[in-house]
Image (spheres, rainbow, N blue to C red):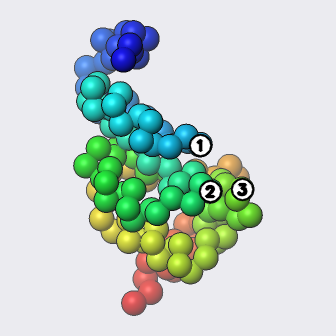
Amino acid sequence: MNYKNLEKILSVVENREIIAIETLEYPLELLETVIADLDLAICLDLGHLMVYDYDLKEIFSKYARKTSVLHLHGVENRRDHKTLCRLSPDVIETVLWVLKRFTGVVSIEVFSYEELVSSLKYLENQWEKP
């Protein structure tokens, strides 16, 4: 495969681990080759994966070693970037499973201060449950 433009960008970056390919609306499997060939990290967007009904545990388990960043946000009626309060009990349980196994950067990707505050409170309350 030809990665000319990406290789140009990478040629001026000292540490390739700072470049992460984000999961969007396409199957992540389409990027496996470029990620492997160029030794890039993954930004695993859990919200996007939820919108497209991926199994979060399965995807995280498969790509955990290459994942440097998690994007986290709620999903409601197939719309993402909502407060985490919108996640069902089953989904937040799975999200917590992922978070407890991840040691990289987590970005709460919501677009208002109110949704950030409610997301953080919700996450804290869920984290403390037995």
- Relative to 38, is 28 above or below? below
Q: Few, some or many C-alpha atoms within 10 Å of disc 1 (few <14, some 14-19, many ≥20)?
A: few
The residue under label 1 is which amino acid type? Glu
Q: Quadrant of residue 119?
A: bottom right
Residue named by callout 3:
79
Q: State the SS at label 3.
A: strand
What's the CA distance linking mark 1 and mark 2? 9 Å
Q: Tell me if 75 is positioned left or right of 121 in this view.
A: right
Q: Nearer the viewer, residue 36 or 100?
A: 36
Q: Hey, which quadrant is residue 52 in on the image? A: bottom right
Residue 34 is situated, as x and y percent measured from the top left of the image, at 35, 27
Residue receiving disc 1: 25
Q: Residues within 10 Å of mark 2 (few under 14, many from 20)?
A: some
Report if residue 113 is visible in the image: no
Label 3 with label 2: CB-CB less than 8 Å: yes
Residue occupying the point 74% across, 64% down: 77
Asked if the residues shown at circle 1 and circle 3 are in contact, with their CB atoms under 8 angstroms apart, the answer is no
Horizontal and vertical percent position of residue 61 = 31, 59
Q: Are marks 1 and 2 in contact (CB under 8 Å)?
A: yes
Q: Is residue 88 left or right of residue 126?
A: right
